[in-house]
Amino acid sequence: MNFHAVRSIYKFEMARMRRTLVQSIVAPVLSTSLYFVIFGAAIGSRIPEIDGVSYGSFIVPGLIMLSILTESISNASFGIYFPKFTGTIFEVLSAPVSFVEILLGYVGAASTKSVIIGTIILGTASFFVDIEIAHPFVMVLFLVLTSVSFSLFGFVLGIWADGWEKLTVVPILVIMPLTFLGGTFYSISMLPPVWQTISLFNPLVYLISGFRWSFYENADVSIILSLAMTVTFLLVCLVIVRWIFKTGYKLRT
Amino acid sequence: MQPILTISDLTKTYAGGLQALKNVSLEIERGEIFALLGPNGAGKTTLINVVCGLVNRTSGTVLVDGHDIVDDYRVTRALIGLVPQELPTETFETVWNTANFSRGLFGKSADPAHIEKILRSLSLWDRKDERIMNLSGGMKRRVLIAKALSHEPQLLFLDEPTAGVDVKLRQDMWNVVSELRESGVTVILTTHYIEEAEKMADRVGVINHGEIILVQEKTRLMRELGKKQLVLHMHEPLTEVPPEVMDYGLDISDDGSELTYTYDTQREHTGITALLGALQSAGIKFYDLNTSQTSLEEIFVDLVKRPQ
Ligand SMILES: Nc1ncnc2c1ncn2[C@@H]1O[C@H](COP(=O)(O)OP(=O)(O)OP(=O)(O)O)[C@@H](O)[C@H]1O
Ligand SMILES: [Mg+2]
């Protein structure tokens, strides 16, 4: 194991995040605060409690997930796409590093940042609404699993993308709708039966539901199923990444 | 001793079907400076990139220090440093950080003293805290050289290191290369400035259309393929080549003031003594003479022009 290399990549990526502190931390915190003002305070005050939880508190886990998903994907995809775009990737490709090491460096840094952002948003949210965390350990587990999975997903996206549009279009066209339809702002049980069934095909339903369970112990699907789906998603991403490095897909000619 | 680099029957066909390398075989000795020459698109960069792991080979084997570049990539890549032809740099990083990053990436523990030594030898030390985007093109190239040397490679590839580079940097670079050679590092470079290869290289390889057409010690190459010319400056202009020296195939200049004799350095008898003797006995006087030699550049142009 080339630990020096993992550390170098990790440090390099974390330094990049420090350089862009405003856009990487302030922006997600600001946008989430706006959600709280609009949905929590302005609109939420007219919405009855859901399963005994005030609406403002109810949306907290979903909003954290929303930020983590978008941040993980954009960070990890940009982290690998940019060197590909400028050509500096040549150095990593000519270095004595395995795919596991490259992954640990890039995805490790992107996940770290997502966990930090998630924690900051949680802190911000506690200023606006009452939050209880019934199962802190499960909460952290979901936070980390989701950060890692979607950083992996972002990494794959960054390698696959051969232009800036592809890089931005996937988060906007795929992830945004899935999170909004995944029960960030409502409980799946509030939907008509047909849509409830359709929702079960949305992997994000399981993430958000499981994460919310760790806060308020209410969930749309069972916690075990949520965890299983999250782990499955992580494994699928790992398999794809492994395949990419085996074949040198889009990295080596 | 085992060669530092052994390439056998290496073939590379790009996805589009273009065959960039055709059964290339080459051995590079430890500690030598090898110049790889060839026209644009000959396959020089492709060859380097295969050895460095940036391009997948189609067939053939490449051994670095006896290790296969695919099966033992950790060993081989740690031994190699690469300064690529293009200049991709981390725009926002500082010179110091990027050099240290490279060292770590290649598996070496931090060694600030070594990085300092490299930056100083490339006149980069006083710009070490500068962001790379604020540096000029030539400075960026220095940064890339510093990065390539940061992990103390045994085999250094310089892919057109002097394209668009000023005199000072060339000088710096050749000083660095000489120092590397003294410490036993093998250097493989490509260049379009052939006088550079002529000055620096121990051996020269010529590649064209993906095939190695010649590998030769530089001095031997120049001796074997080079022609020499002897120019005699006449005291009084001649109207024609004197009949006494008719057999030497001399050329006469338009104004008749110079006679040129072209001879082959390979031949045992160059015929110079005989020619000069014949001129003297005929009473033809000259006041000066000089000799000149075909440059590597002329040899190279000649080689590449030859039909395959
Ligand atoms: N990624 C690629 N995909 C397809 N063809 C390529 C690729 N890279 C290089 N080639 C082709 O392979 C051939 C050899 O290119 P290469 O870059 O090795 O030449 P070179 O000798 O380095 O030339 P130059 O002196 O211009 O740098 C060229 O015909 C080039 O167009
Ligand atoms: Mg080239």
Image (cartoon, rainbow, N blue to C red):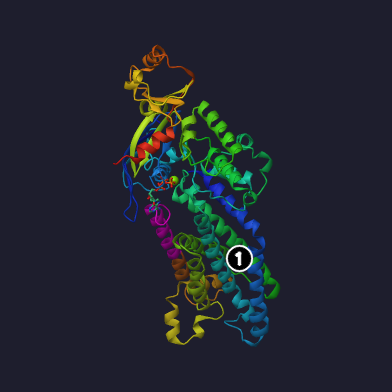
Q: Main secondary structure of the magenta part?
A: helix
In the rendered image, the residue lying farthest to the front is B239
Is the residue B117 above or below the residue A3 in the image?
A: above
**Relative to B89, B43 lies left or right:** left
Q: Is mark 1 within 8 Å of ligand 1?
A: no
Where A92 falls versus A66 (above or below)?
Answer: above
Q: Toward the viewer: B215 or A80?
A: B215
Q: Position of residue A241 (x, y in %)?
A: 42, 57
Residue B199: give x, y in percent of width and height.
Answer: 49, 30
Residue, disc 1: A118
- The reply to whether residue B64 is in sight is no
Image label count:
1
Does the stretch in magenta take in B234?
no
**What's the residue type where badge 1 is placed?**
Gly
Question: In front: B167, or B253?
Answer: B253
Q: Residue at x 46, y 51 (%)?
A: A100
Measured as percent of width and height from the top left, residue A144 is found at 54, 61
- Would you call the spot at circle 1 few (<14 residues within 10 Å), some (14-19), or many (20 or more)? many
Answer left or right for A167 relative to A130: left
Q: Is residue B203 rendered to the left or right of residue B137? A: left
Front residue of B233 and A190? B233
**Subunit of mark 1?**
A
Give above or below for B268 relative to B141. Answer: above
**Residue B143 appears anywhere in the view:** yes
x and y percent of residue B144 in the render?
55, 43
Q: Quadrant of residue B164?
A: top right
- Image: magenta residue range: A231-253
Horizontal arrangement in the rendering, residue B147 relative to residue B19 (left or right) = right
Q: In this rendered view, identify the residue nearer to me: B32 or B105.
A: B32
Does residue A240 belong to the magenta stretch? Answer: yes
Mark 1: secondary structure: helix
